[in-house]
Amino acid sequence: MFDYLSGKLVRVSAESATIDVNGVGYKLLITNSCHIKLPDTKSQVNFYVAFVVREFSHTLYGFLEEGERTLFEALLNISGIGPKTALAIISTLSFDDLTQALLIKDTQALCKVPGIGKKTAERLLIELKDTLPLLATLAPIAATKAPVSHDAISALVNLGYNQFVAQKAVKKVLDANAELSDLSQLITMSLKHV
């Protein structure tokens, strides 16, 4: 129904933003990361919008990036995941972190999200694996680095390091060296961070 809203930012809280579009105020629920990126009030802003209709509510969710909205809508298609949990996932995990968790089947990463336990995390991994191509189109950097980082993490785990520690070390190296694509070099540099 709605695709985007452009207007003046009127009010902001940690959970919501109100935008004035030609005299009509729209209250949008937002993520923590969106809240941090918002400009000052009275600034012009563009939100990509997801309109969620429930039995007793009609709610607008606002995202500064179209990819976040697409991910939000994909998460809503998973049974047992409502808007609140989908928003929590997007607020807690970046595209890179979520893609990485799917590739290496990391339930611990998903358990960091408030309201998600081990069983829900396992179900999410199963149901989200089909959305991996979608995530690749939303975050091209994550998609190009995912196979190399996956292999590097596997190598560190095979050397006896904890999977979480290995993932953190590889991510740290890739964040500092965005162009790094050589697997042996990535493993060597990651060993310095474990």
Image: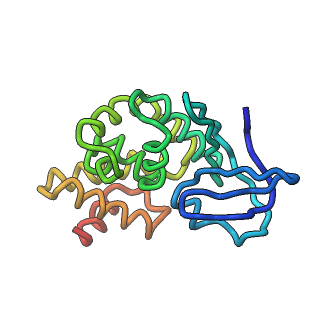
Say which quarter of the image contains residue 171: bottom left
Question: Compared to 177, does 147 lie above or below?
Answer: above
Locate the N terminus by quadrant.
top right
Would residue 161 be found to the left or right of residue 50 on screen?
A: left
Left or right of 139: which side holds 189?
Answer: left
Depth check, front residue: 167 or 62: 62
- Residue 13 % position (x, y): 59, 64
- Determine the residue located farthest toward the left in the rendered image: 160
Closer to the camera in the image, 99 or 160? 99
Q: Is residue 114 left or right of residue 47?
A: left
Q: Residue at x 24, y 48 (%)?
A: 154
Image position, residue 84 (x, y; %): 47, 44
Q: Is residue 151 above or below residue 78?
A: below
Task: Name the colouring of the figure.
Answer: rainbow
Residue name at image x 49 percent, y 28 percent: 77
Where is residue 157 shown, x and y percent of the image?
Answer: 18, 52
Q: Residue furthest front?
A: 56
Q: Nearer the viewer, residue 101 or 172?
A: 101
Which residue is painted at 43% across and 48% down in the image?
89
**On-image quarter of the C terminus:** bottom left
Residue at screen point 60% across, 45% down? 67
The number of numbered badges drawn on the structure is 0
Q: Nearer the viewer, residue 89 or 65?
A: 89
Question: Residue 9's x, y, as percent?
Answer: 74, 62
Left or right for 194, reference 142: left
Asked which quadrant contains residue 3, the reply is top right
